[in-house]
Image (spheres, helix red, strand yellow):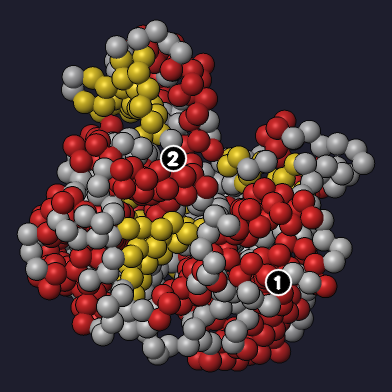
Amino acid sequence: MTTFYVPVDAAARSVGADEVAAALAVLHGACVVRTGSRGMLWCEPLVEVDTDAGRVGYGPVTPTAARELADLAGAEPPPTSPLRTAYLGLVEQHPFLARQRRLTTARLGVIDPGDLADYERHGGWAGLRRAFTMTPDAVVAEVTASGLRGRGGAGFPAGVKWATVAGAPGTEKCICANGDEGDSGTFADRMLIEGDPGSLLEGMLIAGYAVGAHTGVVYLRSEYPDAITTLRRAVESARAAGILGPNVLGSGFAFDVDVRVGAGAYICGEETSMLESIEGRRGEVRSKPPIPALRGLFGRPTVVNNILTLATVPAILADGGSTYAAYGTDRSRGTQVFQLAGNIARGGLVEVDFGVTVRELVEGFGGGTRSGRPVRAVQLGGPLGAYLPESALDLPMDYEALAAAGFMLGHGGIVVFDDTVDMARQARFAMEFCVKESCGKCTPCRVGSQRGMESLDRFLAGADPARELPLLDRICTTMAKGSLCAMGQLTPMPVRSALTHFPEDFAGGRR
Amino acid sequence: MGARHEGLAPEREATVRALAARYAVQRTSLLPMLHDVQEHFGFIARQDVVTLADVLNLSIADVHGVVSFYTYFRTSPPLPHQISVCRGEACQAVGAEDLFAATRTAYRESADTEVSEVFCLGNCALGPSGTADGRLLGRLTVDRLTALIPPGRS
């Protein structure tokens, strides 16, 4: 009997993992286990074969290779084999994985996401069990000591947020996990839920215990159907196993989780817009204050944390906040789950300590562009993030260092462009995206993006830059200073970074 | 129940009410109800807005406002085949704008296929991305799309 591991992750399925799994499953003596993806996405579909030395990988593979994969049983293919270039050796020793520090994503690609017993065999519930031996205040203190900051983009200290909710008046409190991962270039929330949903549930349980909440809501995108299915199954399994419900693991603590699905609105990743959407309304942002930690879902004190933030908590509780805080830089502690995307040779998921340079991620892990042409621009932090020129790639990934240089980390998405990119068109797209995705509540965002797009359209059609670019700058200022939330405030970021760092694309004489 | 229900298809209304009955009669149930109605019928009709407004004791305008806010909710019947192409930045970096234009051209004369844009499917390392009849596709080309859904003639 040979055991094959084939990812059930949506990205792997998008390039044929299901067909490979089916071709292996019909072979005599083959057992196929569907796992999450390791995050070596350029190798998908990546098949791993269980051997005495560990799991040996081959990727990308096609269904026609199934027979040979079974015959090889983990051996190196002969030089004449079509699988020769797909041979990866022991997967965990592959340079792409061996150089990572996987804390949040330790089980990703290893376990069967549909089997909570597999989760437990790989360290699951250890953080929760330890939390139950501590007072809720001590759990909050442990998260504060870890230095964990919000992974959704804002980087707010998780422990401070939890302490605010714990200390807020009110008997009913909520934990909301924000999985509205709409930034282009990000997919870590999706991969984590599809590959290791238990870690999210465990993180929510610990958060609930720490702040005195008994209700959890996970908000997922309708664009992520696989994640929705996987998480709903995990919630049902956890209920059946007594891990969610009136008496969590026999502790007497009650907690349950509801999975809610968005409907194609990018703005619902903004926390107050997400709360409006869960309450059954248009996803229009709320004015702050009051902050959700004091008046959030249904007016209750609410922890709103990103999926990655919550999924990191079990490891912090299991191994101690100081262990986590030992990694990273000055005020950016621990690890960050980066996502390498766009025009990149080795795209995928990379979890490493804060402080790594953009260049190490793009060139070291990512291998440069997929097209083979020079890297010209890197967009950090999604559609609201800045475009970095090649000369900025030696910046360290650190909240403060990036902010000082005028950039932001966001949710850790890194989108690479080669030298064929037209930065004026990218600036125009940033405005177009805001036109389409603005909730419309505040005028600077709703009207400013429209006027900004029109200005760039005139410029692209050959209008005088001396007239259009100062106008564009004033529009950007109005949006940045006058908008209610990050959407309008930060849409000028990609626009202005394009103007600042790629001025040659905005010189006169277009067309 | 009254004059505002005149002209509604009674069977459809009964189905919508049955779908809605699985949820608590609270405003927070509105999006799950809308998802179920769209999953069942393929779209949310004007009369479904009226029905759900009645179920939840909300104004028709209020429910209409929710439906119209979210791009995922559609108010007209879908064509038999659905294609979406991602226009997010990561996919743009590997040719998504050309792919979107070429896809629209390929299906311009197809009466049974809708081509739409989408902003991010979370498949940003294997772009350009898209979907064909709900199936996520990576490293997408027009040839792969036309092999899965042959462009027809109107």
Decide: few, some or many residues near mark 1? Use Cα within 10 Å; few <14, some 14-19, many ≥20.
some
Residue at which label 1 appears = B64
Disc number placed over residue B86 in the picture, else none: none
**Residue A500 visible in the picture:** no
Same chain under badges 2 and 1? The reply is no
Residue type beneath disc 1: His
Report the side of A375 relative to B118 (left or right): left
Residue at which label 2 appears = A9
Decide: few, some or many residues near mark 2? Use Cα within 10 Å; few <14, some 14-19, many ≥20.
many
* Image marks 2 and 1: residues in contact by CB distance under 8 Å: no
**Residue A73 visible in the picture:** yes
Residue A127 position in % (x across, y down): 15, 54
Residue B145 position in % (x across, y down): 70, 37
- The quadrant of the rendering that contains the C terminus of chain B is top right
Report the side of A458 relative to A420 (left or right): right
Q: Eyeballing the image, is A295 above or below A245?
A: below
For the point 45% across and 61% down, which residue is it? A219
Residue type beneath disc 2: Asp
Residue B99 position in % (x across, y down): 69, 48
For the point 30% across and 46% down, which residue is it? A238
For the point 47% across and 88% down, which residue is it? A287
* Secondary structure state at the residue bearing disc 1: helix
